[in-house]
Image (cartoon, grey):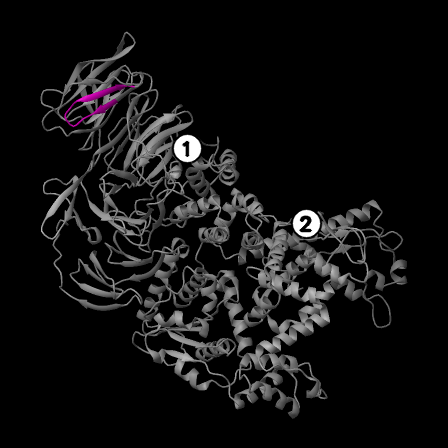
Amino acid sequence: MEHGFLKTQKDASAVLFFRELPRLSKRDCKKNFAKFLLDVTADGLLDTEARELLADLKQRIYNTGRLQPLCMELSKGAMDPSRKEHKGYLGKLCEQVTSQMKELISRNALQTSGTCSTVDPGWSWLKQEIFHHAVLSEEKCSVFKGRDSILGKICISTNACHDPLLVHGPSGVGKTALLCKLAQEMRGVVDHRGVVVLRLLGTSPLSSDVDSVLRGVCLQVCGALGLQFPYPHIANAHEELVRFFHSMLEDVSKQGDTLLLILDSLDQLLEANKPHKLDWIPKVIPPNVQLVLSISDDYVEKCKSLVSAEQNVFRVELLTDDQGKDVIGAYMSAAGRKLTSEQVDTILNRFQQSRSPLHMKLMLDTAKQWSSCTSTSNVRLGVSAQEVMTQFVESLEESHGKKLVSHALCFILLSRSGLSEAELQDVLSLDNDVLAEIYKYWLPPSHTLLRFPRLHWSRLRHDLTAHLTERWEGAFTLLRQFAELIRKRYLSRDMKTDMHAILAEYFLGQWSQGQLRPILLPSLSTLLNADRKVPPQPLWFTGEVANMRKLHELPYHLAHAGKWEELRQSVLGSLDWLCCKTLRCGVSCVIQDLSLCTDLTDCPEIRMLKETFLLLKPLLDLSDGHPSLLVTEIFARLQGLADLYPSMIGQLCSQCVGWFGSCTDPVLVPKCSFFQAPGGPLKSTLTGFMKGDPKELKLLVAGSEDGLIIVWNLNHLQTLHTLSGHTAGVLSLKLMDKTNHCLSTGLDGTLRKWCLISGQQLFCITDAVSVQTHTPTHIHMIEERRIVITNPSRCDRTLCVFLVTLTSMQRVLDLHHDASVLCAVSSSEGSEIITSAQDRIVWSVTTGALLDWIGVMDSAVSSLAVHQRTIISASVIANQLKVWQLDYNTKHRSKSFIPILVFNQKRLLFCGLRTGTILIYPLDFAPETLCLPPPESLPMVRSMAISPREDRMAVAYEDSVCLFEITSRDSFPCVDGPFERYTLCLLHSPISAMALLSDCRLLYGTFGGEVVTYDFKSATAAELDHHGAAITCITMSNWDAQALIGSQDCIQKLWNLSPNQGPELFFTQSCVLCAVFSINDKYVFTGSLDKTIKVWDVCSGCLLYVQFVYSPVIKMMPHKDGFVAVSQHGSFIKEGFCCPDTLKPGYNPLRIFRAHYRVTSREKSLNAPHTVINELPDYNPAQFNFIGIGLMKSKPSNTCVLL
């Protein structure tokens, strides 16, 4: 009690309660001390000293404030549950124990969840993982004998760059024991600046996935050697995590530390993570760092690319006779047993036929049960490990029953990450075949409650000890060789499906909470409906603790059981499930589940959902796990497909609407689909570098401005290599088809040659290229069709197609564009041409017809590459590559719109031209077009603004501003004027934005940053403010009381236009392009260059919500409870805004994104004088830049402060 409870009150792991028995008569005590658990002395008298000590202990426990004593008065010296006070006592006792257990479980679940949002080296999950491998390693090498020569070779260190070390051998040869012994020996050799990291892959959930292994290794090494921990957005993205792992090895070497990293059973990751393969393993290991890998002979061919030198490959040979004798002696000594010479000879005789350590271990496990008089003539020992295991399984069937043995082992084998003993007993309680075998000759104890007898499992568990391995705390899996035997012996297709169905029903909780499951027992002639007493399976145990076992196991078993309807309804079609799994396990785990389903069935809805998560993954990898971001992404992508796919996608969209309705925080609610929808041309976004240029050869190679070259596998869209060498931007790339090599030139003047298989640099030539800028020539040739594509001189908007013969070149097609052609490429078969002129357009080579327009980017597409029917596009000012598909369902295409200026009441559409002409389109008279002629000087139309009542319009030209009047004659619209003209002086900066008030005042801003008011009635102008850069936005409130002015200096100001009122400042780190007030003027919505929409409270100036929309919003208009907008992509955005009357304490609108930011505020003065603000206060409520959404590296931001 002193050490287990009183001294560890904060982290106590004990469940404790105590009771008092008041008014206990001395006569009752003397009659039966034992009955009341009273201490007595040796002569049978009441021990008063012990009673005093017990009373003191109870008082000390009571003083902790954690427990209240339970009081109960006995009835005739006993407890009678039928009495009201005794029944109440039992209820309070159960409540107290239950509450303590829940508190204990919740506390430990949070500590061991492994999903913490900070990088603290004291994470319990990391400590538990390290401890797991340490304990397992100690067991593996406890009786290690021999192998001295290979240990000595592996332990040799080097001060130069080298290959990883590869240890291989047949299954069961002892590779794991060898590497565990290596780790044990090296820990005694390395100094205090050295670290030995061991991972026995596949033995725990965190060692069965590439990302989990890398994350744990990086945290362990960084914590041990004092390196910078990976930021959360790095730890959650595979490509970033691999890059960090490689750079971490370099950092360890540079600071002179020693690192030995041992990864055993690499083939376990190959089976579980097929897309990633071995691309994450560095091909070159820096000095003072050693990477030791082990793999089975079955997979050694796949690892040849990792190791180029033969001296770095070690084969583990079979044991010799002498080593076999040493193993027998050590093993039996550790078990406290001894064999006779006859028994030793028998074992050695069998061992000589295989010389396998696994074979020896299995025989010794059997020999431990022998007595000294056991005759070897009555002993069955197989001549191989497989034969010994087969004999062992046959003996289990004889002892425990074939159904129990086969089903118990298959349940463990079929589980995704092992089963705990409690889970296995629950699953066996649901297995009617096992229960029918157990109750074949007698009836169960109860007809209403039917459970698998615990004693049966205890006996079987005791016999299976040597063939089970602990995978996670309290759970186990089968040893690999034993699992292969069980799979071949028992698992037919029908049995596999049935057992997956039982596991799925268990993790669904289908037979919990009193649900009766029918069974027909051989000893009964009628069907028995009995409660199996299995626990429920909620998605959340508490508000913060998710049911991780259900999240991992349920979709796996539903898919393999073929229960597609349950999978669509309860898992993939459940918004709660998708949010829970995404927030607790990551987007990659959801994609893994969806990939599993698409591999097993051809369901268009599941395929659409998988593409949705592939599209939203880059953004969610950078988020901080808030459901509003995920729900918005799902709804804004799938809403347009709800009618096409009502059963699952329609159900998801309905749940999204319900989620938005119940959200207690401010949120923007999409009213239409405006993100790229699944099934359309855009398939994925590749991130990981600054800005790039793609080239293609089954692999995708892209060079960026930061000097990195990234190689992707186009089949899986996975990063293969990150080639670092250039110290400045990459100028060009040239792939060499036959050699799998690549040449690159950079702004550092170097020419480098790379091997795309190993990822190594082969040579570097300095001062090989000129770094002077030049304009590229757009020439592309389709050799198979003898066609040359180029743009003619002085005509950069036309692409010409020439047919080339031996004697001539004939011009056959002209492909006209609306903007300058930036690049062109042909499809793989040469029948189509894909061009880029701000967007991507597909043309027919045969007819020149426009075949498709596959989307736009907010930045000019500078390079295109084609692989079969896949297009990869890049931009010189974007940090991502876009992957598009030429073959897609046009029904899934996102709708795009052209920005327009519309008079809502008059129903007029105005368009200003560069020549000064203004075209007017009456929407009610479609064939008609009105025209306002330009002034004599033909100046460009810079801006247009309408009054709130739509009775006047102001037009800003290069040299003046004119005021027109909007009327109607005979129900036909008419524009008269100009009635007023405001002439701009020659030195006046051009007008960039303006707004017309109802009292004929004009508020405008210029490219020079001036903000001016001009009154047409009095012909007077007054400068209101002066920004440091061009004015980008002027928006009036609906009642002309306030104006929002945005500028390229990344400052937006809200002005109160009443006399003697100054501005209320909003600060944002990105330029505001457009804004609009809500209908009630309570909120203002802004669209920024950083591709976000922000919502501000007009009264308080507080930032309420931030939404990332992938493209800058260039036009906004109020609509009901929100707004409508048009993005630079051409997407039509329609959203409503929901905000509670009061915000939660500590509400932070930037909480959904991982970033470093500072939020400050200032006191609002209601009577501030009208002054021009020249110096900006330190006020920054939205200091987060989404333009560099892939650039959040470990460098500290010069505008962000971490508090």
Asked whether residue 919 is drawn in magenta, I would say yes
Residue 1046 in sight in this render: yes
| Magenta-tinted stretch | 910-922
Residue wearing tag 1? 672
Residue 1024 — which label?
none
Count the labels in the image: 2
Residue at figure coordinates x 55%, y 82% from the top left = 143
Image position, residue 313 (x, y; %): 38, 78
* Neighbours of disc 2 within 10 Å: few (<14), some (14-19), many (20+): some
- Residue 1118, image quadrant: top left
SS under mark 2: loop
Which of the two labelled residues, at mark 2 and mark 1, occupies the earlier sequence position? 2
SS under mark 1: loop
Query: Looking at the picture, which amino acid does disc 2 mark?
Result: Trp
Residue at figure coordinates x 38%, y 33% from the top left = 1096
Is 123 displayed left or right of 845 in the figure? right
